[in-house]
């Protein structure tokens, strides 16, 4: 049987059963009058005493009273035993009921409104009180109070989960607050689910007008016997009203009032229910109820409950599943199948029996279904899992969540913003590219492993828009550090110094000041620069430079270098001397234009000042991969810097736009000529014969820079193509102590005695961008701008010592120095060789940080 049951029309002239309970008749005009009793009946009752009066009341002439109803029921002359008030009610309930009429139309409700208001008010009043002799005296005041109650129920949108979506619309994560709810459409709810909830919660749902008189009388009898409220009489409509009132409560006092069992609250609940029945269809009421009801285990709404308990859409639930869900709403904790499976099974079977009684299913179907075990989804095993932890991009999810929680567009206060974010049903479309995210996650996982003491974090952004395409860590998102979990977003938090990757900013400032690519310095293995005095490091028995100067990656790294060569080989002493020429403060200003925040310098011992030579090596300056990736994207975008962008569109639960998705915020930070020249020069780091970033090659034009910090505390690679820019940071976030250094790191299937920026970080960069760009047309990086490359200044900037000639060495007649680029051009000085980087380290001696990242 489907749909509402058929019913016979009601006999004309029928008086509401409330009249029988109170001896009060509600007239069509809304006036209260004593129900007329035949004079013969009064005389008989006076003569026969209480028992006779009770018997006479059942043998009165047929009409609008008890006798009239008894006559219609075929039992006009049947004697009834003496009993108290509750007994009379039970006797009345035992009389076979006349089939309920079909639901009256709204016009009928309007005509009967005055009658119903009094009747309902009186019954609800008695439901909350024991049967008392003074009940009749209470009737009129209750009815008047009922008529004065508000009739319109305020029903704001239900709190429902918000979704974070990728750029292609796929779900990244679902955010929910106290109520885990996804509101579903009525078309999604199958008939079996509707039948199950109606059968167990409100079998006359399709017949009543918001209240169930027979249920009220049954509750009245029970409450009269007990002397307090032992049984309610709520219909689904009334339950919906109660849930709405509870939902609207914002304070503890309002919540207590919403679940109060007082007469006043019951009257108000019923007033709302009868009004709703006039305005909404049964279909609308049922769908609203199923969306608001609590099903236990943190699941609000039947759609959420189906997914939570069974892992299926509500449209796909079986008879057994529907019966279980329907049985939960009466007592979600008692019948919780996770914690109380036996009680849940019994309750499910009770629902099946009720469905048989209602002719919704056959007894055979019920018996077969009862044999089925309760099979639950794995999602029920842990209801406290952070929603971002289950995301395909957990750290990006956390970043979006954190950014939106402080966005004033979602509210003026933290409470308002949180409510909107977690309960507003927002659909937040982000910039995340699933293909790029998958490539980045696979790269950090495969290269470093999920259980490595060393972390690897990567961010990929889109040049020209600032869109964040990917964000990945090799560690899992969580709080169990012993299981290599973290909630610290190392992709967006400044946890490591980026080392020599800062040299690109020094180069850009030099170009902006007119220094051309030919700008050359003799760059010894160690150099003391007057502009950048360093207090002695306290090392005894070493050369003065070791205590007061800046040194290269290796003791044999020295020579005369122009700007491109020094960048490719990451020569520290070259860039220290270049910084002395152009100045610390202008360089820091340019870096700021590229997104390096002022707080970067808060950890400096003496603050940012003109004598801080460590700027070009980013000493004591922690910066996040997100900031570095976005800064380098400026070089790929012709000098246009764009603020990091994570959301492109958002709508609320009603489909209206939410203003949290601004257009790309970009500005021209440096000239296109300077950006193109830097980009072209950085290609040599990857593709040049002596570049430190060869492992970052991806089979198409790419540029970048390596960075390795003092004592191997961290290693970086930041690079880009015209379509994507990425930053990779590898390190142990516990600190710079020797035991946390990047020494003897087990990664990529082998032991790395020392990790440089050109090692694991470069590998991760290449393993990310190569698959991420698969199928994307190849674009060439720009050529160096001729005017910028030439500059207004250039050439040799200092005087090199006279080299000791060796056989086969070619000397430049203009500079007196070996000609760069020839096999034997590196000048040889006493005790110095010509090695560059870890590939030429001397046997038996551990190398110093590759890429040259700090003083020693």
Image (cartoon, rainbow, N blue to C red):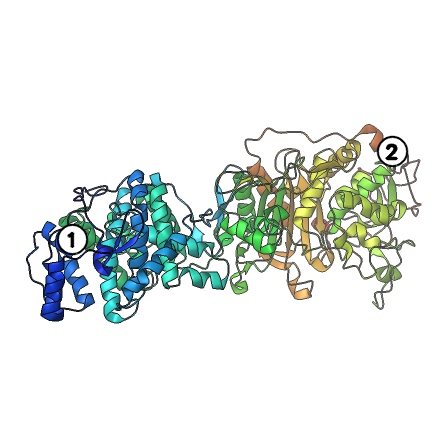
Task: Tell me where residue 625 appears, x and y as whole percent.
Answer: 66, 49
Q: Quadrant of the N terminus?
A: top left
User: Which one is in front, 585 or 289?
Assistant: 289
Q: Depth check: 253 or 712 in front?
A: 253
Q: Residue 838: give x, y in percent of width and height.
A: 70, 51
Provide the secondary structure element on which disc 2 rests. loop
The disc, 1 or 2, on the residue closer to the chain's N-terminal end is: 1
Residue 791, numbered circle: 2
Towards the viewer: 379 or 824: 379
Q: Is residue 799 above or below residue 680?
A: below
Can residue 78 be seen here? The reply is: yes
Which quadrant, please, contains the C terminus? bottom right
- Rendered image: mark on residue 367: 1
Dot 1: within a 10 Å radius of its alpha carbon, few (fewer than 14), some, or many (20 or more) residues? few
Instruction: Report crowding for label 2: few under 14, some 14 to 19, many 20 or more residues within 10 A (C-alpha).
Output: some
In the rendered structure, the answer to whether residue 50 lies left or right of residue 697 reads left
């Amino acid at each position: 049987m489907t749909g509402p049951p058929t019913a016979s029309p009601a006999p004309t002239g029928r008086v509401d059963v409330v009249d029988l309970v109170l001896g009060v008749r509600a007239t069509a005009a809304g006036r209260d009058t004593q129900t007329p009793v035949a004079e013969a009946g009064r005389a008989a009752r006076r003569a026969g005493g209480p028992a006779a009066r009770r018997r006479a009341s059942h043998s009165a002439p047929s009409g609008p009273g008890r006798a009239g109803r008894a006559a219609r029921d075929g039992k006009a002359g049947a004697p009834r035993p003496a009993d108290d008030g509750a007994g009379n009610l039970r006797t009345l309930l035992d009389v076979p009921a006349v089939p309920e009429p079909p639901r009256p139309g709204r016009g009928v409700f309007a005509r009967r409104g005055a009658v119903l208001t009094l009747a309902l008010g009186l019954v609800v009043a008695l439901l909350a009180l024991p049967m008392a002799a003074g009940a009749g005296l209470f009737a009129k005041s209750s009815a008047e109070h009922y008529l004065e109650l508000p009739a319109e129920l305020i029903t704001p949108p239900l709190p429902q989960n918000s979704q974070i979506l990728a750029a292609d619309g796929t779900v990244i994560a679902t955010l929910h607050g106290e109520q885990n709810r996804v509101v579903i459409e009525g078309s999604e709810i199958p008939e079996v689910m509707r039948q199950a909830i109606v059968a167990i919660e409100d079998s006359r749902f399709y017949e009543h007008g918001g209240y169930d008189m027979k249920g009220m009388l049954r509750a009245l009898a029970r409450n009269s016997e007990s002397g307090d409220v032992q049984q309610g009489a709520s219909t689904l409509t009334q339950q919906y009203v109660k849930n709405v009132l509870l939902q609207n409560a914002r304070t503890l006092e309002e919540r207590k009032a919403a679940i109060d069992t007082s007469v006043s609250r019951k009257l108000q609940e019923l007033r709302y229910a009868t009004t709703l029945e006039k305005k909404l269809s049964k279909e609308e009421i049922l769908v609203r109820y199923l969306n608001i009801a609590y099903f236990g285990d943190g699941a609000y709404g039947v759609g959420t409950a189906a997914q939570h308990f069974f892992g299926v859409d509500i449209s796909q639930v079986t008879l057994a599943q529907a019966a279980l869900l329907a049985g939960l709403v009466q007592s979600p904790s008692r019948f919780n199948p996770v914690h109380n499976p036996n009680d849940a099974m019994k309750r499910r079977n009770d629902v099946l029996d009720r469905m048989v009684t209602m002719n919704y299913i056959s007894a055979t179907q019920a018996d077969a279904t009862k044999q089925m075990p309760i099979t639950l989804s794995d999602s029920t095993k842990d209801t406290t899992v952070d929603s971002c932890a289950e995301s395909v991009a957990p750290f990006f999810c956390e970043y979006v969540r954190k950014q939106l929680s402080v966005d004033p567009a979602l509210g003026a206060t933290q409470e308002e913003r949180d409510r909107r974010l977690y309960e507003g049903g927002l659909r937040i479309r982000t910039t995340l590219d699933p293909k790029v995210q998958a490539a980045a996650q696979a790269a950090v996982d495969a290269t470093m492993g999920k259980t490595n003491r060393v972390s690897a974090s990567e961010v990929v952004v889109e040049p020209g828009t600032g869109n964040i395409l990917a964000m990945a860590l090799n560690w899992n998102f969580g709080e169990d550090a012993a299981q290599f979990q973290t909630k610290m977003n190392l992709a967006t938090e400044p946890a490591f110094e980026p080392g020599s990757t800062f040299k690109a900013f020094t180069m850009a400032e030099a170009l902006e000041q007119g220094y051309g690519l030919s700008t050359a310095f003799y760059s010894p293995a160690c150099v003391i620069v007057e502009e950048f005095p360093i207090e002695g490091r306290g090392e005894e028995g070493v050369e003065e430079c070791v205590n007061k100067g800046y040194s290269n990656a290796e003791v044999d790294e020295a020579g005369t270098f122009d700007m491109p060569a020094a960048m490719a080989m990451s020569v520290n002493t070259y860039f220290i001397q270049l910084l002395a020429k152009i100045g610390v403060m202008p360089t820091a200003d340019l870096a700021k234009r590229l997104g390096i925040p002022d707080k970067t310098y808060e950890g400096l011992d003496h603050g940012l000042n003109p004598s801080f030579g460590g700027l070009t090596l980013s000493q004591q300056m922690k910066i996040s991969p997100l900031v570095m990736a976005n800064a380098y994207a400026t070089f790929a975008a012709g000098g246009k810097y764009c603020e990091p962008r994570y959301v492109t569109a958002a709508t609320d639960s009603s489909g209206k736009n939410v203003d949290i998705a601004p257009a790309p915020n970009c500005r021209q930070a440096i000239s296109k000529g300077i950006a193109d020249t830097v980009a072209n020069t950085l290609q040599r780091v990857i593709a040049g014969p002596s570049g430190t970033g060869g492992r970052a090659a991806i089979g198409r034009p790419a540029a970048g820079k390596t960075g390795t910090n003092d004592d191997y505390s961290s290693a970086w690679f930041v690079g880009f193509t015209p379509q994507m820019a990425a930053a990779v940071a590898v390190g142990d976030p516990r600190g710079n102590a020797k035991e946390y250094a990047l020494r003897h790191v087990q990664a990529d299937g082998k032991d790395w005695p020392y990790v440089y920026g050109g090692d694991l970080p470069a590998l991760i960069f290449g393993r990310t961008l190569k698959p991420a760009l698969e199928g994307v047309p190849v674009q060439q990086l720009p050529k160096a701008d001729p005017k910028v490359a030439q500059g207004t200044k250039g050439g040799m900037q200092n005087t090199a010592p006279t080299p000791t000639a060796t056989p086969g060495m070619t000397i430049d007649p203009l500079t007196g120095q070996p000609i760069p680029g020839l096999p034997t051009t590196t000048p040889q000085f006493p005790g110095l060789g010509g090695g560059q980087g870890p590939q030429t380290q001397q046997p038996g001696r551990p190398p110093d940080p590759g890429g040259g990242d700090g003083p020693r």
